[in-house]
Image (cartoon, rainbow, N blue to C red):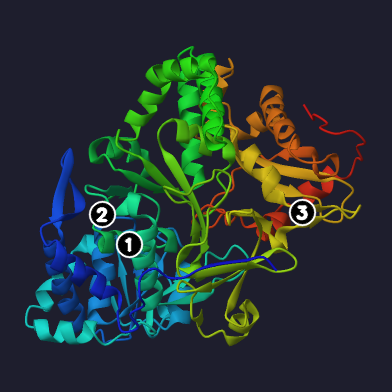
């Protein structure tokens, strides 16, 4: 059994809870700008001391409103400064936040609030409150709801004016490391969401150790980041807490339509994103170049960037001609992309799905080192991550301090250590099934190289076994296809079938530019585009490219382009944009059957 385990580099403190991270930060650097809040065309700084004052004032309001230590409080909001303000106010009041995705349906809201036993809920907008109102009759325990846009937080602060500082100090010190800090529900990609009990030690010890491991990213003077992925997800939630511990200035932009202007004005030193964001940046730049008649230049620049990065990673000498081309493209292409991201980004932390080596090498040559990592809700986010001084593109990095990872005989990744959750809430059966001793069974499959870098090869339950007995990991095919500008999502199918096929959806954001660049009507409806010969040929090209990396038995022989998009609203994607494979295969069972109604005997049959 392959196993890598790294001892913690910061001594554990079993009595510490998350509030101590803020108190310590204020003690060290009270005047440090810990947040940037949008104001006009720029950003207004909020110091560590001012943030703590606001946190305590809101915590007093929660106490005055009847929230007791240990009470569960739901929270539905987008990624804004107020998200972390509410988060820490609940910590200081001794309460337990139950975050809910801002896109959740009334049924999902009802399940999470009911299952968690929440007695109150904070919503951001009237629209969020309306969704909650629709199921309020089924939530007898929820006795209070505050809506931020309706002045809910301000009224709480006013209500708490008579609560003493000593009372909040008493409340914030009740919890120790083993106590529940938050109850985060899984995204539900494999069934009904389960509540993960994450403890104060999970956040405290992981933050303290990760800050040291990622010293060059988060502990350098002037470190800053702009959060735009949802803080309801454990990935951004952990980073927001880590930033407070490490003294990173954090800004927020909940609407990705305004991401580029926000990056330009905030100028972060590192980013946190999912692979789809990096794909969008690359594809948008490519289509913009194509529209300006510079498509060939961009593609040549991209090819040179990837080649240059690979040579550097392998420690090989850069040929003279490659150095000349790289310097030229740096002035013509790369500098513009760096400026589009604010001009100061040095690192980008990527998680939740595989990035792909092409994008990793491309951004590396731009001067942006993408530190791909791996983790789950159950591991408080990162278990492994590439480090500034120890990075390898195409992997999710080495094990973080305080964490151990081993591979079971079938390749399943198992994790133990400071980051592993305590249990599934009110679900002892699921908890027992998820552990082998103190090792959490992730359900993911991977491999280690000789230097301890982990590579994710797929989900254990998603492995396809063809009728010929060939084991196929869908991600190896899906990720490179999804990198194509016009492809939205792709699901590989073929379990117990004679060959592998794929369901494909188009990207409605990228499609118009691609159509215009290929002399087709930019407003072509999705259903018509799905049948268009040029579109189908482009998808075939993406599939041909992906097939180069697998054996003939694993290659995709047939595909169909669906006339719709898979979205979170349609029920086919999770809030972090992961596909719900079981839902898709159920909903599109007919289309899958049709793929196998006419046998094929050759590889890469175009249906155009």
Residue 444 position in % (x across, y down) = 64, 62
Contact, mark 1 vs mark 3 (Cβ under 8 Å): no
Residue 189 appears in view: yes
Q: Which mark is drawn over residue 514?
A: none
Residue 231 appears in view: no
Residue 403 position in % (x across, y down) = 50, 69
Q: Which mark is drawn over residue 589?
A: 3
Left or right: 441, with 265 as reference point: right
Local packing at callout 2 (Cα closer than 10 Å; few below 14, some 14-19, many 20+) is many
Quarter of the figure with residue 533: top right
Q: Which mark is drawn over residue 248?
A: 2
Q: Closer to the N terminus: mark 1 or mark 3?
A: 1
Left or right: 121, with 168 as reference point: right
Contact, mark 3 vs mark 2 (Cβ under 8 Å): no
Which residue was labeled with disc 1?
242
Contact, mark 2 vs mark 1 (Cβ under 8 Å): yes
The residues tagged by marks 1 and 3 sit, at their Cα atoms, a distance apart of 44 Å
| Quadrant of the rendering where the N terminus is positioned | bottom right
At a point 85% along the width and 44% down the height, the residue shown is 553
Q: Closer to the N terminus: mark 2 or mark 1?
A: 1
Q: Nearer the viewer, residue 424 or 392?
A: 392
Q: Name above or below for residue 586 compared with residue 608.
A: below
Residue 71 position in % (x across, y down) = 33, 84
| Circle 1 SS class | helix
């Amino acid at each position: 059994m392959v196993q890598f385990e790294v001892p913690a580099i910061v001594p554990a403190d079993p009595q510490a809870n998350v509030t101590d991270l803020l108190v310590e930060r204020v003690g060290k650097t009270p005047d440090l700008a810990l947040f940037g809040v949008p104001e006009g065309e720029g950003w207004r700084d909020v110091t560590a001391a001012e943030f703590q004052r606001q946190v305590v004032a809101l915590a007093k309001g929660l106490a005055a409103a009847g929230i007791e230590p240990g009470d569960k409080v739901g929270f539905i909001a987008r990624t804004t400064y107020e998200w972390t303000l509410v988060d820490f106010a609940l910590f200081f009041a001794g309460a337990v936040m139950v975050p809910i995705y801002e896109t959740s349906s009334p049924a999902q809201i009802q399940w999470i609030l009911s299952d968690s036993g929440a007695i109150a809920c904070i919503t951001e907008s009237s629209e969020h409150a309306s969704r909650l109102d629709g199921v309020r009759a089924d939530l007898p325990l929820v006795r209070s709801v505050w809506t931020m846009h309706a002045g809910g937080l301000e009224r709480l602060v006013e209500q708490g004016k008579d609560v003493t500082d000593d009372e909040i100090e008493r409340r914030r010190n009740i919890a120790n490391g083993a106590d529940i800090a938050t109850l985060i529900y899984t995204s539900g990609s494999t069934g009904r969401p389960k509540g993960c009990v994450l403890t104060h030690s999970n956040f405290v010890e992981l933050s303290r150790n990760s800050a040291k491991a990622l010293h060059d990213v988060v502990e350098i003077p002037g470190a800053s980041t702009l959060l735009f992925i949802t803080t309801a997800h454990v990935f951004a939630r952990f980073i927001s807490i880590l930033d407070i511990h490490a003294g990173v200035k954090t800004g927020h932009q909940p609407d990705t339509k305004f991401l580029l202007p926000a990056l330009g004005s905030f100028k972060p030193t590192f980013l946190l994103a999912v692979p789809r964001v990096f794909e969008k940046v690359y594809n948008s730049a490519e289509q913009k170049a194509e529209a300006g008649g510079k498509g060939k230049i961009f593609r040549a620049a991209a090819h040179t960037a990837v080649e240059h990065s690979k040579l550097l990673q392998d420690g090989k000498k850069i040929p003279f001609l490659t150095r000349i081309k790289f310097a030229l493209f740096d002035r013509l292409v790369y500098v513009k992309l760096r400026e589009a991201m604010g001009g100061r980004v040095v690192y980008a932390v990527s998680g939740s799905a595989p990035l792909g080596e092409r994008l990793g090498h491309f951004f590396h040559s731009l001067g942006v080192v993408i530190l791909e990592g791996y983790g789950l809700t159950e591991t408080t986010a990162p278990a492994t991550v590439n480090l500034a001084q120890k990075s390898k593109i195409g992997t999710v990095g080495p094990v973080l301090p305080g964490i151990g990872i081993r591979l079971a005989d079938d390749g399943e990744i198992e994790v133990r250590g400071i980051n592993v959750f305590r249990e599934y809430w009110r679900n002892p059966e699921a908890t027992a099934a998820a552990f082998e001793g103190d090792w959490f069974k992730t359900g993911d499959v991977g491999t280690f190289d000789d230097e301890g870098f982990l590579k994710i090869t797929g989900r254990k339950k998603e492995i396809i076994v063809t009728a010929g007995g060939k084991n196929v990991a869908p991600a190896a095919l899906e990720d490179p296809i999804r990198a194509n500008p016009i492809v939205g999502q792709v699901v590989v199918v073929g379990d117990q079938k004679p060959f592998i096929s794929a369901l494909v959806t188009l990207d409605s954001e990228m499609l118009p530019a691609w159509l215009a660049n290929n002399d087709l009507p930019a407003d072509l409806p999705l259903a018509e585009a799905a049948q268009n010969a040029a579109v189908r040929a482009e998808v075939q090209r993406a599939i041909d490219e992906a097939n180069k990396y697998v054996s003939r038995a694993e290659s995709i022989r047939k595909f169909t382009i669906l006339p719709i998009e898979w979205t979170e609203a349609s029920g086919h994607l999770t809030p972090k944009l992961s596909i719900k494979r079981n839902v898709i295969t159920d909903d599109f069972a007919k289309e899958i059957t049709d793929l196998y109604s006419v046998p094929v005997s050759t590889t890469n049959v175009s249906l155009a």
